Image (tube, rainbow, N blue to C red):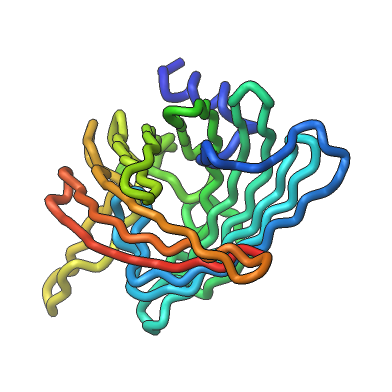
């Protein structure tokens, strides 16, 4: 049994959630807490991967005694941008550990954009397990794809994995967070048409993260929150780099937390 199979088996009931050191979640509260949010970003970057331009990103999270359910969506303003719907469940322990499971669904992968299509070779779903730990001074998260459309070139499960360290700090009345994200081995991906002529057709394999161990995200994000009554309005800007793809970005965004 390979190390990737062992890790995936250990993670298979857990999913992605990066906690904030400023979370006001009360673990022992008997009340159900519902947190709706609507965000607008100038560019949609995910783990160092460009996923489109200006995007509207609504979400809602329900918490009860450490258990949570979260729905996140993203829709770009360009017709070429993928539409995304992510559903997460998990648990936050009072000592900082978090576990969970997320179902990612994106348009543009399955030919007819069918949601209820789960064959590994054609589905637009990816199921990811996560385990992580959040301290006052850092958050370390491990994410591994365990089901769905996550196959390597040979058609075998790739167990695509992303590991991210984030470090929050406060300078000049701004909340800053530094991010470092890596993938420890070759990720899965999918083939796309690269070149076509009368005599032959060439397809290119597009890796989800990278073709081997690689750093895919180095970024610094600054956030300042404003308040309109009971509505929190965080405004942020981020400078980032993907050393593997040799790309860079500068983006901004605003959210409305109710």
Viewer-proximal residue among 192 and 198:
192
Q: Where is residue 42 in the image (x, y as percent from the top left)?
A: 34, 72
Q: Measured along the vertical axis of the image, is residue 179 above or below residue 96?
A: below
Residue 93 is at least partly visible in this image: yes
Viewer-proximal residue among 186 and 134:
134
Q: Is residue 109 left or right of residue 201?
A: right
- Which image quadrant is residue 229 in? bottom right
Q: Measured along the vertical axis of the image, is residue 132 above or below residue 160?
A: above
Q: Where is residue 138 in the image (x, y as percent from the top left)?
A: 42, 29
Q: In this view, does 186 lie to the left or right of 121?
A: left
- Which image quadrant is residue 86 in? bottom right
Q: Measured along the vertical axis of the image, is residue 126 above or below residue 124?
A: above
- The total of numbered circles placed on residues is 0
Residue that extends furthest to the right in the rendered view of this protein: 30
Q: Which residue is drawn at 47% across and 50% down?
A: 149
- Which image quadrant is residue 232 in? bottom right
Q: Is residue 34 left or right of residue 18?
A: right
């Amino acid at each position: 049994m390979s190390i990737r199979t062992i890790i995936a088996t250990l993670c298979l009931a857990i999913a992605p959630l990066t906690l904030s050191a400023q979370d006001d979640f009360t673990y022992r509260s008997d009340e159900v807490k519902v947190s709706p949010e609507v965000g607008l970003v100038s560019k949609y970057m995910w783990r160092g991967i460009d996923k489109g331009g200006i995007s509207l990103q609504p979400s809602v999270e329900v918490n009860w005694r450490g258990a949570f359910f979260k729905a996140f969506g993203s829709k770009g303003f360009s017709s070429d941008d993928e539409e995304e719907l992510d559903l997460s469940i998990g648990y936050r322990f009072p000592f900082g550990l978090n576990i969970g499971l997320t179902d990612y669904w994106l348009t543009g992968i399955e030919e007819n954009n069918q949601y209820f299509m789960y064959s590994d070779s054609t589905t637009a779903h990816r199921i990811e397990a996560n385990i992580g730990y959040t301290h006052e001074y850092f958050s370390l998260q491990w994410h591994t794809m365990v089901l769905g459309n996550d196959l390597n070139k040979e058609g075998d499960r790739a167990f695509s994995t992303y590991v991210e360290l984030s470090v929050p700090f406060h300078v000049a009345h701004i909340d800053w967070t530094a991010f470092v994200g890596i993938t420890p081995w070759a990720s899965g991906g999918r083939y796309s048409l690269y070149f076509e002529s009368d005599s032959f057709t060439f397809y290119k394999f597009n890796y989800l993260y990278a073709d081997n161990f690689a750093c895919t995200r180095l970024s610094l994000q600054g956030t300042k929150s404003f308040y309109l009554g009971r509505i929190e309005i965080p405004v942020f800007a981020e400078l980032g780099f993907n050393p593997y793809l040799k790309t860079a970005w500068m983006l901004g965004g605003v959210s409305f937390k109710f």
